[in-house]
Image (cartoon, rainbow, N blue to C red):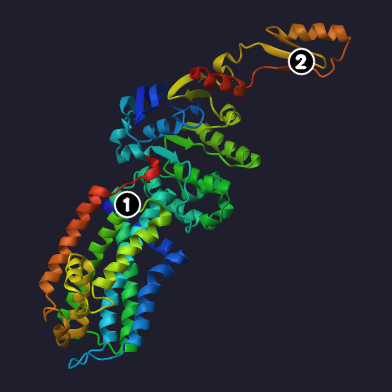
């Protein structure tokens, strides 16, 4: 157990270093939420009537959720598919490294990447779009648990999804496609009031909608609650769904994870 | 001497294909053992079963006294595996990678010493992506031996090397063998097996068709010698006598004289042809 933690930390350092040296991956992971926030925030500068909340502030909250999911789900889904093909997993499976150390490393490195992304997006929100950082302690507590639960669930989903692509080449397409669709139906880019109910029902199954809802509660405050479909942020349900995904993701990983590539038989 | 690897009646099927069909193998501790065979003969499947990467269908397998299907971390720590193709860790430097892997093993060697041993001291701080193919394989070997293993597997280690890189790589393997490490090597190159291995086994169609000292494999030492000169060829068991007769006939220097025995390659080609008849 102590080996797993020590080697997991060592792997986290290594994974983070590798990530930031791989310029393509850095740009791929960081640029989308940042560019889209600047773009949408500049295009849709209106206020919601009677709330004092601007559309760009809503986008900031939503894109922080999308950014976290990108750093966890997308980054791990693609990264592990590549690890499976380039020999990383095979090599590690041949060493006495405890296998859980690999996952600890991946999860911690995506935590570092996600935190950095959150800080950048928050800075854009605060300096460009007049987003107020929460002043109440309880809001920071909410922010912490939403981020940690959301990130862990999304990371586990990404680890499970890494088994889907047939090769490293197809990984970016196979992993990014559902993620982009999910962003559009989870209220990141398009408000729920514009979506048909059946799409909302689909997105309500997945964690992104709930993560974004939790984040809006932190950054938009009480006045923003009336913009929600139910007129409330439903923090209890947010916690429940995110926790369910955490457990479901873990089960899915344990059931489906492959240390070998498809061609390795 | 103690046994490093013991295999009896190993079989493995892929669908209807019998990849391994009743294979027996006995490798002693401290020896360099080469497994030869054409593509698809079952070399890599056999080695991957020994390494614990694949499951067998039937048969008895012991590697360092342990069934590889019940691999433990302690057992893995005594093994070094040099993979056939790996392109991982491209953005890390040689030293970062070796140091990190040293942390996995309870009795690891000194990273800088291992880097020196594989001849990469000057490249220690270079990212692996920037290394040549031969240097890349040296990193693989370094990762295979950083844990001070008792047994090292090398799967086709010099494929794609230029002749000079191959010679240098052989010296590296000879150095490991001299330290007493048991080495199991698969290769396509017969000169490689001859240069490195104390014993070789030839696998064809999932079975061992010949096994022994590369110098005597398949009756090589007992085969007839070929004496050839400018206008004649004789196959004989007594080449010295033939040469003396020829010397007398030509009264001195024999024009274009050559005395040859079948090469390992000749023997190998007849061995892998035989079972197909």
Is residue A51 shown left or right of residue A174? left
Is residue A237 shown left or right of residue B27? left
Q: Chain of mark 2?
A: B
For disc 1, the marked residue is: A163
SS type, badge 1: loop
* Residue B63 makes an appearance in the image: no
Q: Which residue does the image show at 54% across and 27% down from the upper left?
A: B197
Q: Nearer the viewer, mark 2 or mark 1?
A: 1
On the image, the x and y values in percent for residue A258 come to 31, 47
Could you classify mark 2 by the number of other residues whose Cα lies within 10 Å: few (under 14), some (14-19), or many (20 or more)?
A: some
Is residue B22 shown left or right of residue A198? right
User: Quadrant where the N terminus of chain B lies?
Assistant: top left
Image: A253 above or below B180 = below
**Depth check, front residue: B95 or A251:** A251
For disc 2, the marked residue is: B228
On the image, the x and y values in percent for residue B99 come to 44, 52
Disc marking residue B189: none
Could you classify mark 1 by the number of other residues whose Cα lies within 10 Å: few (under 14), some (14-19), or many (20 or more)?
A: many
SS type, badge 2: strand
């Amino acid at each position: 157990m102590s080996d797993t933690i020590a080697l997991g930390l060592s792997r986290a350092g290594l994974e983070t270093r590798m990530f930031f040296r791989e310029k393509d991956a850095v740009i791929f992971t960081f640029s989308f939420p940042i560019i889209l926030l600047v773009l949408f925030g500049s295009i849709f500068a209106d206020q919601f009537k009677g709330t004092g909340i601007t559309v760009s502030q809503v986008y900031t909250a939503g894109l922080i959720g999308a950014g976290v999911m990108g750093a966890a789900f997308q980054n791990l889904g693609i990264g592990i598919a590549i690890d499976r093909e380039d020999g990383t997993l095979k090599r590690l499976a041949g060493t006495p490294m405890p296998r859980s150390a690999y996952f600890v490393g991946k999860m911690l490195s995506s935590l570092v990447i996600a935190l950095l992304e959150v800080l950048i997006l928050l800075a854009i929100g605060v300096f460009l779009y007049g987003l107020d950082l929460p002043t109440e302690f309880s809001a920071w507590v909410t922010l912490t648990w939403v981020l940690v639960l959301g990130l862990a669930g999304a990371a586990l989903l990404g680890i499970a999804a890494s088994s889907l692509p047939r090769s490293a080449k197809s990984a970016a397409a196979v992993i990014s496609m559902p993620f982009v669709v999910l962003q559009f139906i989870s209220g990141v880019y398009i408000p729920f009031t514009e979506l048909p109910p059946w799409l909302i029902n689909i997105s309500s199954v997945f964690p992104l909608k709930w993560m974004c809802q939790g984040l809006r509660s932190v950054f938009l405050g009480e006045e923003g609650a009336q913009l929600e479909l139910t007129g409330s942020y439903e923090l209890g349900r947010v916690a429940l769904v995110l926790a369910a995904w955490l457990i479901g993701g873990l089960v899915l990983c344990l059931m489906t994870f492959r240390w070998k590539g498809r061609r390795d038989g | 001497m103690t046994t490093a690897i013991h295999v009896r009646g190993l079989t493995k099927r892929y669908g209807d294909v019998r990849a391994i069909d009743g294979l027996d193998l006995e490798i002693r501790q401290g020896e360099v053992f080469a497994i030869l065979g054409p593509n698809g003969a079952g070399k890599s499947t056999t080695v991957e079963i020994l390494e614990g990467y694949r499951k067998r269908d039937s048969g008895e397998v012991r590697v360092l006294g342990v069934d590889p299907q019940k691999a433990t971390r302690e057992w893995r720590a005594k093994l070094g595996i040099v993979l056939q193709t790996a392109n991982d860790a491209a953005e890390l430097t040689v030293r970062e990678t070796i140091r990190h892997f040293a942390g996995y093993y309870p009795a690891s060697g000194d990273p800088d010493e291992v880097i020196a041993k594989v001849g990469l001291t000057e490249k220690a701080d270079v990212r692996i992506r920037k290394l040549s193919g031969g240097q890349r394989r040296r990193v693989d070997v370094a990762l295979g031996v950083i844990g001070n293993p008792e047994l090292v597997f090398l799967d086709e280690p010099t494929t794609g090397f230029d002749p000079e890189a191959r010679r240098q790589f052989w010296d590296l393997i000879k150095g490991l063998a001299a330290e007493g490490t048991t080495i199991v090597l698969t290769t396509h190159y017969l000169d490689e097996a001859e240069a490195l291995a104390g014993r070789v086994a030839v696998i064809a169609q999932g079975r061992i068709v010949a096994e022994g000292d590369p110098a005597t494999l398949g009756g090589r030492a007992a085969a007839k010698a070929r004496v050839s000169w400018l206008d004649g060829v004789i196959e004989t068991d007594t080449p010295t006598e033939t040469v003396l007769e020829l010397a007398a006939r030509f009264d001195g220097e024999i024009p274009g004289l050559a005395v040859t025995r079948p090469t390992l390659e000749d023997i190998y080609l007849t061995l892998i042809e035989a079972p197909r008849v």
